[in-house]
Amino acid sequence: MPADSLEFEQKLAEFEQRNSPEGLLLRYALRRPAYFWFRQIFMICGSLVLFLTGHFLIGLVVYLILITGELVDTLFLKTIPKQLARGVPYKRLHHLATATASFQSLTSVALAFFPVWLEGSPETLAFCFAFIAGGGINSSYLLSFHSTATYIRLSTLLACGIATIIYGAAFGTLGLQAQIYSVFALSMTIFLVFTFLQYSQSGFEHRTKSERRMLEQSLELAAINKTLHDQQSEVRRLALVARYANDSVIVADPKGHILWVNEAFTRITGYSSEEAIGKKTGALLDGPETAFTTTAAIESAIATGTPLRTELLNYRKDGTKIWVETNQVPIYNDAGQVEMIIAIERDVTADKYHMEELAVAKRAAEDGERAKTQFLATMSHEIRTPMNGIIGMADLLQDESLSKEQQGYVETIRYSAEALMRIINDILDFSKLDAGKSVINPVDFDLLGCVESALSILRPKAIEKGIFVKLNCLTPVPPLLRGDDGRIRQIVINVVGNAIKFTQQGGVTIDLSCYPSSEGNLVTLEVSDTGIGIAEDRVEQIFDQFSQADGDITRQYGGTGLGLTISRILAHEMGGDIALRSTLGTGSTFTITLELDHTLDALEVAAEAALDSLPSVKLPGMKALVAEDNLTNQLLIKKYLKDTEMDVVYARNGREAVRLALRHQPHVIFMDMSMPEMDGISATRKIRAEKALTQPKIVALTANVYASDKAACLSAGMDGFLSKPLKRSDLMGWLCQI
């Protein structure tokens, strides 16, 4: 903001502060003490009259009374600025200032009343009325700053005048004629004071309004100047941007005739501004290969005054083809008519050729991927067929009567063939996983039996090496879980087989545990060995494809280096991971974690039991939307809501939840927080932003129970919070509140 605007805003703020109740009280407290000595001259002269008329003692008493009232009022008013600065309430100070003004006004009547009391002559009445007029005019100066104090002083002076007339008439010191003159004299005094009072008040109000109007007009003028300055600066900046922009800028009239072009237009097309102005863009730049549909769309957009963004083929002045991306926007005047059309055009020739190259490369890559897949499938078939023959013939030879040496040859053939088959299987599995193809096929299976069957395959090798393989089941394991038992067996064989391979003494211990989780069951397998261990800087590298701890180990123990890589990818596919702790020379511990679902039968039994144990809730006609990507949790909620007679729809992700909410207009939405494509928080915000939607109750479903998570749900617009694993009682409780 310019300095003059700030200056006028500050002056206006100061003006408002001066004329606020606190500001007026402060001005009153400063001005009245400023005229203290002027009033003293008035009071001393009045007391001197009593001295000169022979009433020395009365004159002294009168002056002491007057000075006492003045000092009380003046000394208190001098403290008001400091008290306001300390934060003393305005009303309290205002009341106290009124009280001191009342006391001072009562003491001031002594100079008017005592002369009448001493003599009661018309002369003393004239003196009294003169004092009333002077005191009234003096008080009127401060009417706008403290009206209550002013009116008290004027009322006291008026009462004093009336009292002196009554006193003179009552004690017979004034005749009827003198009384009549006195009444008219007092009336004229009151009229004089009232006239001055009106003049003073109207003058103050006029000055205040004029000053406020002047400040406001100055501020408005400063704002107008600032707006004008900003507009001029913006116009200059826009002119510079348009002139020196890298993209071509074209300004045309409503018919499409060019009015102005920037320097980039000349650089891109080769036409100067003189050659371009007055012509239509299409007539200047279109050529034989320019698409007719595109030019027709541009002409239509110009005729109808609608924006358009498109790409088209143009020709430079030298005939060179160029691809341009044009974005034309109509500019309307105040009457709603098209005033001009601005088109911004960018040379995208290089991008166009690059996209074509990318498309060719993409097709080549896809062809290469298909060729690779076909090659692997063919090689798998071609290699497996003779390998099966080799292994089968080796089995048959073992049944023959062979010498011990010949039996060793056959065993070597069989072992080598099986090792080659494992390598082939590893390469095929890795190829599928690396291509992003899911290889997980969940079924209901016995986890403990699956692990035991994998270990039964590995134990003969361990026994041959003289080491142990021990399985410890640390927690109860459900008889059936849902997962891919074949892939779990593959992971166990890879990890435990790896441990057996690198262990010469001691053995391998597998600790199995299973814990219920919000999504099903968390299975943990800790595989600890007493083998050669791995150096700390090589721990993560062993999960890299075709990688082992070092080349000597590869030569000594063999292997492709794909087993652990495939196992970790499979663990990720099943919602888990494989971590490693190892110390060189003392052994390693692999921790396998997997997320396995409940079996469908077990879920149905649990849901039915929960339904039977609680009273039912009937909500016919009510619509509910369940946004939950986990099929297990969907099944549970479906069972819970089965008898409620609600109309329930299900969404597998946040984006689908928003779409279904707009279509079905549900009364309540149960929103999972963690979903693919769009999470629950984002979906809730989008639903709350939809004006056409009758806003439903939205209840969060999540395993996160921290206060920050609840706060995030509520701030996004959710109405409640249900934690996982979800209980039917909690769900029914929420439905009863709707």
Image: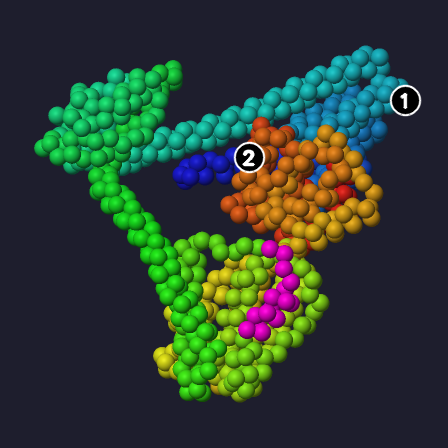
What residue is pinned by disc 2? 659
Is residue 538 visible in the rendered image? The answer is no
Closer to the eye: label 2 or 1: 2
Question: N-terminal of the two: label 2 or label 1?
Answer: 1
Q: Is residue 75 left or right of residue 232?
A: right
Question: Magenta stretch: residue 456 in it?
Answer: yes
Q: Residue shown at 55%/35% (left/top)? A: 659
Q: In this view, does 543 lie to the left or right of 268?
A: right
Q: Quadrant of residue 720?
A: top right
Q: Number of callouts in the render?
A: 2
Question: Magenta stretch: residue 506 in it?
Answer: no
Q: Which amino acid does label 2 sit on?
A: Arg
Q: Which colour scheme is used?
A: rainbow
Q: Residue shown at 61%/45% (left/top)? A: 628
> What segment carries the magenta color?
443-457
In the rendered image, the residue lying farthest to the left is 318
Please name whichever residue, 240 or 82, is drawn nearer the observer in this view of the structure. 240
Q: What residue type is labelled 1?
A: Phe
The picture places residue 466, in percent across and down from the top left corner, at: 54, 87
Is residue 88 visible in the rendered image? The answer is yes
The picture places residue 261, in percent across and down from the top left corner, at: 20, 29
Q: Does residue 505 sit above or below 252 in this rendering? A: below
Please name whichever residue, 62 or 394, is drawn nearer the observer in this view of the structure. 394
- Identify the disc placed on residue 171: 1
Q: Residue shown at 78%/20% (left/top)? A: 122
Q: Separation of disc 2 and disc 1 at Cα?
A: 101 Å
Q: Does residue 534 sit above or below 603 in this rendering? A: below
Mark 1 neighbour class, 10 Å CA radius: few under 14, some 14 to 19, many 20 or more = few
Q: In this view, does 369 lie to the left or right of 453?
A: left
